[in-house]
Amino acid sequence: MRHLAPALLLSLSASLAQDWTEFRGSDKQGRSPATGLPTEWNPNLNRNIVWKTSLAGVGWSSPVVVGDRIYLTSAVPVGGDEKPVIDRSLRALCVSATDGKTLWDKEVFPQSAASAPNIHRKNSHASPTPVYENGRLYVHFGHQGSACLNAEDGTTVWSTRDFAYKPVHGNGGSPVVEGDLFIYNADADSDPAVIALDKNTGKLRWKFSRISDAKKKFSFCTPLVIEVNGRRQLITPGSGVVNALDPVTGTEIWKARYDQGYSVVPRPVFAHGMIFISTGYDKPVVLAIRADGSGDVTDTHIAWKLDKFAPHNPSMVVVGDELYLVADNGVLSCVDAKTGTVHYQERCTGPISASILYADGRLYLQDEKGLGVVVKSGKTFQVLARNDMTERSLASYAIVGDDLLIRTEKSLWRVGGK
């Protein structure tokens, strides 16, 4: 990595104006106002690599950035040997954004191999992304538990393992913080639910039982809080149904059904008065749903559908009137968000799970082999650059200042153009 002179360190620290406080960023939908992000990088040539830091264990949570600090989670094998069946330490860590050095590294929960269900080959035991708010870091390990940490030093404010459930393929969806609540989906293989805890104590505030016709109940989605006609809605997709809940009480406002769709992963996005979701396995369909309904809106509020090259895993992004989505096979689509009219569908990456990032007129995509592809936004497909990190990658991008953060299987990279 290139040597970081003191003047450069000061410049980097001063540039950290754009925080990235949860999964998909502070706007929650994969968009950033940052400008001057790099379009080209190459670790082998040390091109635009500010620093690289090794990460112990395995975790596909995305980085969270606040000021000059970066927060992550990881599952570290006890004894240091990664095997399919082994005890692990579920950890949260903080690294310096200026040089990548670890500032603190704390165990949140021990995980016994005997009680940890098997995970999918594309999952990890630390996949949910933390949430930062007002000096606190909220971390979530799905069925293994949740905790609130002091972001300054990693000390525990509260932790709970009281709301365990039986997952399929391990943990996945990230939590959200809304008002005084910490909320997450608990879509187990039976009795799926949405759970809200008091963010100050970790005590249960409400639990919503998700009911649908889907035979396979498990899903891994991250909810999204929106506002419609002055009313807050918690949009929470699960197997066979997307529910809009009152985030304060957990009561249902509306729902839309999609039959047998399961293992729903992409986080919803919201624009033009509509929620955009993808309905999961085995055959995903993108639905545009008007969000001003009440009760069962399946037959009244679905504005359009798209069933070709819909994503199983990557979350979508809306920029202006265009909705961008990438299928897991790497085909990128640009669609009119209001009508569903397809502008293009083009092969863009290899197999991909990470969500799309938009910033400064560009779309950033990172595939599972570590290939980063930069595409110009607009109705015409135009690739600006292809950048190979040469290491497996399933986590989504984050932004620190005007640089990118890229998490690969073994490392965290800060990539910048200056």
Image (spheres, helix red, strand yellow):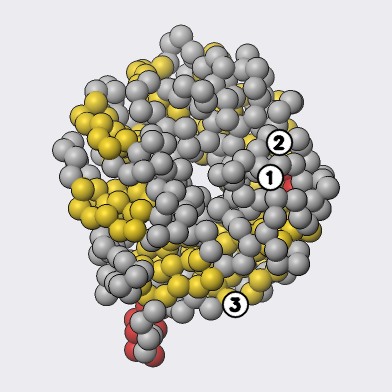
Q: Which residue is mark 2?
A: 167
Q: Inspect the image, locate mark 2, and give the three-letter code of the amino acid beneath it.
A: Pro
Q: Position of residue 23 (x, y in %)?
A: 50, 50
Label 1 sits on a secondary structure element that is helix
Residue 323 visible in the shown view = yes
Task: Determine which quarter of the picture holds residue 92.
Answer: bottom right
Give the secondary structure at mark 2. Answer: loop
* Label 1, label 3: how far apart the Cα atoms are: 25 Å
The disc at residue 195 is none
- Residue for point 19% across, 40% down: 381
Indicate which disc, 3 or 2, sits on the residue closer to the N terminus: 3
The residue identified by callout 1 is 142
Q: Residue at x 21, y 48 (%)?
A: 383
Q: How many residues crowd mark 1 within 10 Å: few (<14), some (14–19), many (20+)?
A: many
The answer to whether mark 1 and mark 2 are in CB contact below 8 A is yes
Asked if residue 181 shows in the view, the reply is: no
From the image, which quarter does the N terminus lie in?
A: bottom left
**Quadrant of residue 356 within the rendered picture:** top left
